[in-house]
Image: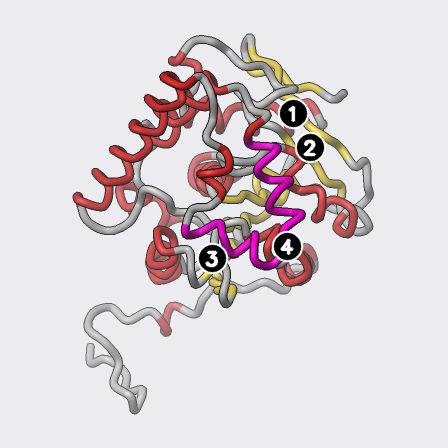
Amino acid sequence: MPQAKNQDVQVHFEDSSGSGSPILFLHEYAGDHRSWAVQLKPLSARHRCLASSARGYPPSDCPDRSEAYTQDAMNNDSLAVLDAAEVDKAHIVGLSMGAFTALQLAQFHSDRVLSVTAAAGGSGSAEGQSAREGFVTEALGLAAMMEKTRAIPAEAMCKGPTRVQLRSKNAAAWQMSVDHLASHPWQPAAHMLRGVQVGRPSLRDQEDTLRTVSVPVLLMVGDEDTSCLNVNIWLKQIMECARLMVFPASGHALNLEEPDLFNNSLLNFLALVDKGEWRPRDPATMPKAGVHTALGLAESD
């Protein structure tokens, strides 16, 4: 099994060994490297696909130290996978927690990034202090529950308002996601909630660096993913490098809910980037202040 090493932590990854530009897939909190199975087969025909399991997710190492779970560790684990695979630059595709890491790499390690696809990103970054506090309270409460029961409440989590869409569309895929989540060890899952989900900054606090990102970015979000929808609209508004795709009647697990739409959209985006045909947003479309009128009149200088 391919392994990368970041200091004393071994990180597992799958390698399709396909030809074409490389893609690194980064999973969500409730997933692992297996979550990308419906992407790896079709995309491997055109790309070399790497899918890693984050620390705390077997077969990667699961440190028993809470301080081992930080956003910086997640960023460096991803870079370690690229190093182990001898990949200089890759397209980074992340879902939720993985989307946050993908945006981190675009901001602070752009020399390793060909493009970023950030799907269902933005949890914990809704506008307003009360929204942030609510996210933190919920995450800390879930971590405490796991430690009390010594288990992950997988089925209950997957029946949440942004995950029942998957059950309606594909009951087998939903059950697989429940089983995968239930198989994760509870203690690293609690550490991840406290150290990464709560410990990472809000995207709102990174506005200045997000505005400077120049690598191509594709934002994907479901229109029923309440905690992430407005965050992605905001990201589109501040990032000239970003394009936004909203999936109708969709929740959080976009790659599993709508695999064909996800895969085709991703392939089209990567093809534009690889052919040098991707273009950032025209600055003239980004108003300096106020709102354009319905007539489309330009702002006065």
- Residue 20's place in the image compared with 150, above or below, is below
Mark 2 against mark 4, which lies toward the viewer?
4
Residue identified by numbered label 3: 221
Whether tag 1 and tag 2 are in contact, CB under 8 A, the answer is: yes
Residue identified by numbered label 2: 87
Q: CA distance from mark 4 to mark 1?
A: 36 Å
Q: Nearer the viewer, residue 299 or 102?
A: 102
Mark 1 against mark 3, which lies toward the viewer?
3
Whether tag 2 and tag 4 are in contact, CB under 8 A, the answer is: no
Residue under the point 20% across and 81% down: 300
Residue type, label 4: Asn
Q: CA distance from mark 1 to mark 2?
A: 6 Å
- Residue 129's place in the image compared with 238, above or below, is above
176 part of magenta stretch:
yes
Residue range highlighted in magenta: 161-181
Residue identified by numbered label 4: 170
Quadrant location of the C terminus in the rendered image: bottom left
Q: Looking at the rendered structure, which numbered label has been put on residue 83? A: 1
Residue type, label 3: Val
Q: Earlier in the sequence, mark 4 or mark 3?
A: 4
Q: Earlier in the sequence, mark 1 or mark 3?
A: 1
Q: Nearer the viewer, residue 210 or 155?
A: 155
Q: Nearer the viewer, residue 249 or 170?
A: 170
Whether tag 1 and tag 3 are in contact, CB under 8 A, the answer is: no
